[in-house]
Amino acid sequence: MSIDINKFLRLPTLPTVAVEVIRLFDDPNTSMDQVATIVRKDPAIAAKLLKTANSAQYGARGTVSDLKRAITLLGRNAVTPLVLSFSLSNQSVASVEHAEYYQQFWLRSFVQATAAEIVASLFGSPALKGECYTTNLLATVGKLALLRAEPDKYIEVLQRAKAEGVAVTRLEQETLGINHFKLSSVMLGQMGLPVRCVSAILALDPCSRPQHPDTVEDMRLICISRAANAAASLICGSTHAISMVELEEALEELDLPGKLNSESLLSLIQDRVDATAELFNVNTQELPPVAEILQDALE
């Protein structure tokens, strides 16, 4: 099928603050002042960053009321993922038309990012953890572009995928000529997301050629993204058996420094999502228990 990919790129998909933060993501010369200037454009995000900086998790001594100090306290590796998360969560709540699908998108994105962060944390690198979280948080933004450009067709694709228990990427390709991972990689590449992150997203596309990264770090990012995507598909999707196989293969390929199997990872993800649901406007009511997910994967 021949398509004009530009029709999916013409409509704004991500909030302005998110796009500006992505552009600064890989710039080592970015100052805290620059980040603070961007965040101040969205008072809701600024307020949530202050709330996070004052939380027990970051152990601030005294109340943090200055945004720049909050950003400094949180640290560069945490600020970008947090700003992007708050930006996307606000968008999911504010979207009136097709609200159900925006909320589904946000839930799955957050689950996938959380999964990536948990796995990456086992390698002891704050930079890797932030990079994995950000990459996987943004990996499916192509869904938003498809929903905005072809709402009727895309909603039918999503409904069919759920009803038939088939991969949504297959139906996207058949119906629209492109799948959301490919579209995400194009969009985010244009926005300035680092090439290694874009490559990790493209590696999730079943229609793309296998990725052969140059470094161990880039390969690790790809493998963690595969594991996170499979875990999110297990928790939020309908292809449980296939997703379980993909998750176990990805975890085995990672050769993790700590003991982590599929069941323990799913439990950690659900615990983390439950603990942060209120802060990130995540509705966890539809998430099935881990035992139910595992049972469905065996059937």
Image (cartoon, grey):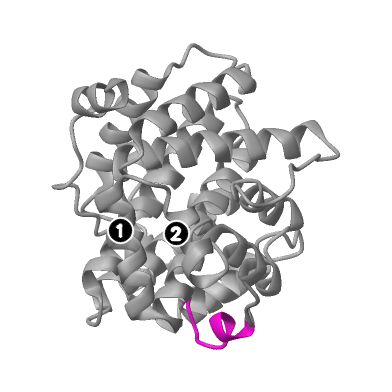
Q: Is residue 156 above or below residue 97?
A: above
Q: Is residue 69 visible?
A: no
> Residue at horizontal 63%, vertical 21%?
253
Q: Determine whether the residue tagged by mark 1 lies in a helix, strand or loop.
A: helix
**Marks 1 and 2 close (CB-CB < 8 Å):** yes
In the structure shown, which secondary structural element does the residue marked by tag 2 occupy? helix
Q: Position of residue 178 (x, y in %)?
A: 57, 66
Instruction: Using the image as rendered, state which of residue 58 and residue 88 is in the foreground.
Output: 88
Of 135 and 241, the residue lying toward us: 241
Please tell me which residue is depicted at 36% across the width and 39% down the height of the picture.
239
What span is in magenta? 6-14
Q: Amino acid at mark 2?
A: Leu
Disc 1 target residue? 160
- Residue 121: give its label: none
Q: Which residue is disc 2 drawn over?
A: 171
Position of residue 279 measured from the top left corner of the image (x, y, whole percent): 26, 55
